[in-house]
Amino acid sequence: MICHLKELRLARHLSQEELGELLGATREEVCLWEQGKRLPVPRRRRMVAAHFGIEPSEIWPLEPRADG
């Protein structure tokens, strides 16, 4: 699975730990999400996307879009 979370995080100059703190997750969870080894639960995917002002499908391409 392709995940664009790392690129988004780095563009905002955030460490994995800083992003995790913002989202109520651990650094380890963020690392697993970025590597595509784990997918956050739907609620958390929406939180991550909202933090970056985009749709979850723009981070995790297999995620269904809200409009369709």
Image (cartoon, grey):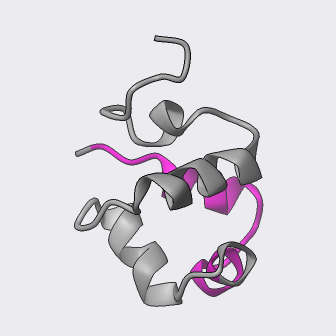
Query: Does residue 39 sit above or below 53 in this rendering?
Result: below
Residue 41 rendering spot, x and y as whole percentages:
40, 61
Q: Quadrant of residue 13?
A: bottom right
Residue 8 rendering spot, x and y as whole percentages:
62, 51
- Is residue 10 on the magenta stretch? yes
For the point 67% across and 72% down, the residue is 23
Q: Residue furthest front?
A: 43
Q: Quadrant of residue 17?
A: bottom right
- Point out the stretch of residues depicted in magenta: 2-20
Placement of the N terminus among the 4 image quadrants? top left
Nearer to me, 18 or 24: 24
Residue 36 rendering spot, x and y as whole percentages:
28, 59
- Is residue 58 on the magenta stretch? no
Q: Main secondary structure of the magenta part?
A: helix
Placement of the C terminus among the 4 image quadrants? top left
For the point 49% across and 42% down, the residue is 59
Left or right of residue 19: residue 41: left
Residue 37 rendering spot, x and y as whole percentages:
22, 67
For the point 77% across and 59% down, the residue is 12
Left or right of residue 58: residue 36: left
Nearer to me, 43 or 48: 43
Query: Does residue 65 sit above or below 29 in this rendering?
Result: above
Left or right of residue 35: residue 19: right
Q: Quadrant of residue 15?
A: bottom right
